[in-house]
Image: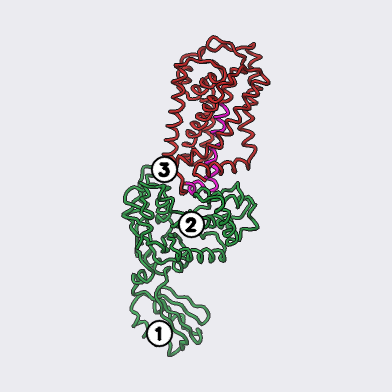
Chain colours: A green, B red
Amino acid sequence: MTVAIEVEDLQKVYRTSNGGVVRALDGVSFKVPQGRIFGLLGPNGAGKSTLVKILSTITPHTSGRAAVRGFDVARQPLAARQQLAVVLQQTATENLLTVRDNLLIYAYLHGVKSHAAHERLQTVVEEFELGSQLRDTVQELSLGTKRRIQVAKIFMLDAPVIMLDEATTGMDPLMKRRVMDRLRAEARQGRTILLTTQVLSEAEELCESIMILDRGRSMASGTLPELRKLSTHMFRVNLLFADTNGDLVSKLEALQPVKLQVDGNTVEMVFQGEEASLLGRLAEISRETPILQFEVRGPTLEEIFIRLMKEKG
Amino acid sequence: MTGIGAVFYRDYRQRMTNIGFVFWDLFVPLAYLVLFGMGFERMLGGSVAVEGRAFGYTAFLLPGVLGMVTFSVAMNTSWGFFMDKDSGIFYELLTYPITRPQLLIGKISFNVLLAVIGSVLAVVLGVVAMGAPIRWDLLPLTAAIVTAATAGWFFLFSVFAIKLARMDAFNTVLSAAYILLMFLSSMFYPLSDLPIWFRVPAYLNPMTWQVDLLRFSLLGVGSPKTLLIEGVAVVVFAVICLFLAVRALNRAD
């Protein structure tokens, strides 16, 4: 297994202007094998963007080690950067230049030859539907289009590692879907992708392994099934009742679900506790209000995330 | 395309989107030469003595105008870092596979070209319109001094542009630099007649070293020993400022 990204006991300490100390990263470790999509999740201030900045050599770390395809980001920053295409959290475009210049200059700055850059330009422009805006100055375009250009730029390259810091923020759903499909395809071809997001459904759909960060520390990491094991007594029940009239809702509330959502005759509940005793109580309810469909599933990433955050307080 | 070449191309494309900037860099120093030079030449009654030789004030001012060109070009180029911050591209640039010195040198390369063009225009204007007695044989040296000085000033101002978060703070630094570095130097007047409290900081000012060197390359005046020291100092100043700017980029978070 070739390791594309390796982070070992990484610490980042900032000194604030009033003499205080902020521990943005506190002993974070993980490895991302080549060709995998790795997700970093966490609330605001968790340290996700700091980690991306360290890996992309913008910010030096305080201690520990980080390497991209074997190149230490502190000791071999140029070699590490040569492996990377990065989309940072803030919108980053050359506002005074045209869309065309944005894409071409990005390629040139990454060492792509002029002929190859022009060839790649056609494909990227078609894929990201930028053809009609190619000659427009970027500052005249909407924020969503700027974001699209920013993400499109990374596909002007063949960098083996792609890092995206909340890259789909501000994108329309269709384009977001297209980017996600493209990222999956890139991973299948061997490119490694590290993404940070607060959109948990996005991470759930895209990432093969995930790390949940909070206040600079890793709270949990692993594949989605591994993370689900952290919530062994948490499960989701989807029910379709013949009708939801009468005191059905109050009976369901009496089961003390973590989450209860009623939509017509459909009910979605999340429980924390023993599955067997709950099923018995649901059977009692079904004698009065028949259940037409019944489904028990593991928790979603969002539910795991919320539970971990609540545990942490 | 090499790293420096790509950054050069990027800056060329950017600068060409705002001809006003280019105009400012190239023609404002010329206006100084014509308006300021002519006014003072009349007021002083014709000549300024340097190292025992008399020059018209316009000829005396010409090396200073070249100094002004290098200063203006460097200021406007370093200001570009704020445009990069404003558009969000600044941090992304730091993730590109180019070294920090390549980024800085590439950024100033196109603008050095502008400074050399601006200097040639000033020299031509000085000779044709105002009859300045120029040492044409030393023009390559003039170009070399303009190049080293523009780079040095750019690297110095870049340290502030990178470190400061607020544009108004950066503008204050530039305004202070403009007043202190240009007027506390040999740019507008010979230092020999000035009081000691003025002369000491002026001799420590890189603008003085640069203008003295340009006065030698353009007019052929200056003491060889002093000029040698000043030449080395200009290069050392540029190298130290490059080092500081690279360090600022490495700590840009």
Q: Earlier in the sequence, mark 1 or mark 2?
A: 2
Residue name at image x 50 percent, y 87 percent: A242
Residue at 42% in and 43% down: B250
Disc assigned to residue A158: 2
The percent position of residue B72, horizontal first and vertical second, equals 57, 31
- Image position of A160 with respect to B110: above or below: below
Q: Which mark is residue B251?
A: 3
Q: Is residue A119 part of the magenta span, yes or no?
A: no
> Which element carries disc 3, helix, strand or loop?
loop
Q: Tell me the CA gap for discs 1 and 2.
A: 54 Å
Disc 1 and disc 2 in contact, CB within 8 angstroms: no
**Vertical order, A150 against A272 (above or below):** above
**A188, A248: nearer the viewer:** A188
CB-based contact (under 8 Å), mark 3 and mark 1: no
Task: Please name whichever residue, B196 or A71, is drawn nearer the observer in this view of the structure.
Answer: A71
Which mark is in front, 3 or 2? 2
